[in-house]
Image (cartoon, grey):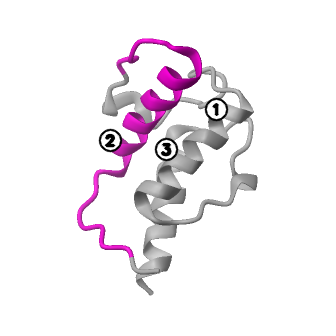
């Protein structure tokens, strides 16, 4: 499977998809998350995602980037920066 992504702002996409998950699962208005601080945010503690919402987020990201993310690597202490790194690793693996 070929991935045609060039100079993607992975973090921005991650935040956008997170907003979709929160809006869809909870009906919450979009939460403003700055890219400056986003990498430090814990997806479960700081953002309040439950395990189903985390899986929804992974599914959206996999579809958008045409990658596979190992859900077992998403732990209780996972931060947005960790997800960004997983996405970039998966994209790089596809380019090999």
Q: Tell me which residue sits at (70%, 53%) in the image.
A: 71
Residue 12's disc is 2
In this view, the mark in front (2 or 3): 2
Report x, y in % for residue 76. Answer: 74, 35
Sequence-wise first label, 1 or 2 = 2
Q: Tell me which residue sits at (58%, 48%) in the image.
A: 58
* Residue 31 is a magenta residue: yes
Residue 53's disc is 1
Q: Nearer the viewer, residue 82 or 8?
A: 8
Sequence-wise first label, 2 or 3 = 2
In this view, the mark in front (3 or 1): 1
Report x, y in % for residue 34. Answer: 32, 26
Distance from disc 3 to disc 1, alpha carbons, whole Å, reads: 17 Å
Q: Give residue 47's quadrant in the image.
A: top right
Number of other residues with Cα within 10 Å of mark 3, as a class: few under 14, some 14 to 19, many 20 or more: some
Q: Tell me which residue sits at (63%, 20%) in the image.
A: 48
Report x, y in % for residue 55. Answer: 66, 42
Q: Which residues fall within the magenta stretch?
A: 3-32
Q: Secondary structure at mark 1?
A: helix
Residue 69's disc is none
Q: Secondary structure at mark 2?
A: helix
């Amino acid at each position: 499977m070929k991935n045609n992504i060039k100079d993607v702002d992975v973090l921005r996409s991650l935040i956008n998809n997170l907003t979709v998950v929160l809006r869809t699962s909870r009906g919450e208005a979009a939460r403003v998350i700055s890219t400056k601080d986003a990498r430090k945010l814990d997806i479960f503690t700081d953002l309040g995602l439950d395990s189903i919402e985390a899986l929804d987020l992974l599914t959206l990201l996999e579809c958008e980037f045409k990658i596979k993310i190992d859900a077992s690597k998403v732990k209780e202490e996972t931060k947005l920066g960790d997800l960004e790194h997983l996405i970039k690793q998966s994209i790089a693996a596809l380019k090999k």
